[in-house]
Image (cartoon, helix red, strand yellow):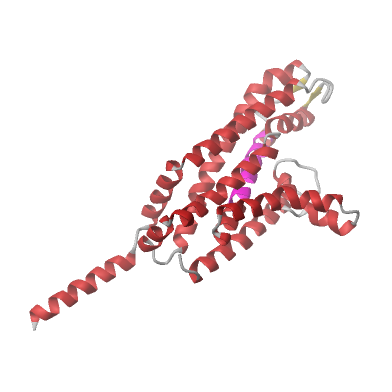
Amino acid sequence: MSTLAQPSLARSSHIDASNRGLSATGILRSEWIKLRSLRSTWWSFGIILAIQVGMAVLFALTADGRFGQVSGEAATDAAVTVSTVGLVFGQLVIAVLGVLVISGEYATGQIRSSFMAVPSRLPVLAAKAIVFSIATFVVTLVGIVASYLVTIPILGGVGVQADPFDGALWLHFVGAAGFLVLIGLISLGIGATLRSTPGGIAASLGLLLVAPTILSVIPAPWANSMAEWTPSSAGQGLYYWGGIFEPWQALLVMLGWVAVLLTAAAVLMKRRDA
C-alpha cells in the first residue's frame, strides 16, 4: 500500500513544483540575460547612441543664426532641441528592437521554453516590458546627456547660454528618454500581438512614420487631428513643451497606446498556442 502511494506522491510533488514556475526575480533575471545576449540589442542601442550624439553635433554646428543670443528659458529650449533631435530617427530603431525582443522568440521557438518555465505566461510579457523599459531609458538618457555635454561649447560659441543646473532642462531630458521607452513598449505590444518579425516591424513603422505622414497631407481637419494623436506626434509633448499637448496630456495619450496594445498582446498570449 505504502509502496504504491510513494510514486503517486512523488508525481504529485513534481507537478506542484513545476506549476510554481520561476519566481518574479528569476523571470526578470532570465529576461535580462536574453535581452543582453541578443546582438540586435547591442546594435540597436549603439545606433541610438551614435544617432543621438551625431545628430546633435551636426545640428549644433549649423545653429549659427538659428537661435541667436539667448539665455534663460529660451536657451534651455534651444539646448533641448539640439540634444533630442536624434530621437526622430532613434524612435524607428527602438521600434524595430521592441518587435524583435518578442517576435524573435516566436520565430526560434524559444518562447515555448519560457512558457514551460512560467505556465501563466503573462509574467513573461511583464518581465520583458520591465527589463526592456529600464535598459532603453538608461541608454537613451545617457545618449541625451552626452549630446548635451558635447554640444555645450558649440552652442556657447553661437550665443546659447543654457544653464546646466536648470531643473527644467533635466525634466525635458527625462521626458525625452521616457518617450523612447513608450515607443518601444508600443512596438513590443505590436510584436507580441502579431508574433511576426516582418509584420511587427512593418506595423510599428507604419504607425510611427507612415500614418502621421498620410494623415498630415489629407486636407481635412479630422485628419490633422488624428495625426496629432499618433504616438510619434503626441509623444513629443513629453519633451517639447508648449505644443498641442501638455506634458501630462502627452503622457496619458502614450500610456493609452501602450495599455491598448499590451492588453491585446496579453489576451492573445493567454489564448493562443505558443
What are the residue bounds of the magenta stretch?
169-185
> Residue 49: which quarter of the image?
top right
Reply yes or no: does residue 223 show up in magenta.
no
Which image quarter holds the C terminus? bottom left
> Residue 18: which quarter of the image?
bottom left
> Residue 229: which quarter of the image?
bottom right
Placement of 268 over or under 232, stated as above or below? below
Q: Where does the image place residue 59, in percent across and percent down from the top left?
A: 74, 26
Reply yes or no: does residue 178 show up in magenta.
yes
Of all residues shown, which one is farthest toward the top? 157
Q: Where does the image place residue 31, in percent across and percent down from the top left?
A: 43, 50
- In this orientation, does residue 94 appear? yes
Main SS of residues in magenta:
helix
Of all residues shown, which one is farthest toward the bottom? 1
Query: Which residue lies at the image location 66% right of the left edge and 59% below the top edge?
Result: 256
Query: Which residue lies at the image location 68% right of the left edge and 21% below the top edge?
Result: 152
Q: Where does the image place residue 241, in percent across and percent down from the top left?
A: 76, 42
- In this orientation, does residue 247 appear? no
Please give left or right for residue 181 compared with residue 127 in the image.
right
Query: Which residue lies at the image location 39% right of the left edge and 66% below the top edge?
Result: 119
Count of labels in the image? 0
Placement of 199 over or under 156, stated as above or below? below
Which image quarter holds the N terminus? bottom left
**Residue toward you, 174 or 267:** 267
Query: Which residue lies at the image location 68% right of the left edge and 29% below the top edge?
Result: 55
Q: Where does the image place residue 190, in percent across and percent down from the top left?
A: 60, 57
Of all residues shown, which one is farthest toward the right? 219
**Residue toward you, 221 or 114:** 114
Please give left or right for residue 158 compared with residue 33 in the image.
right
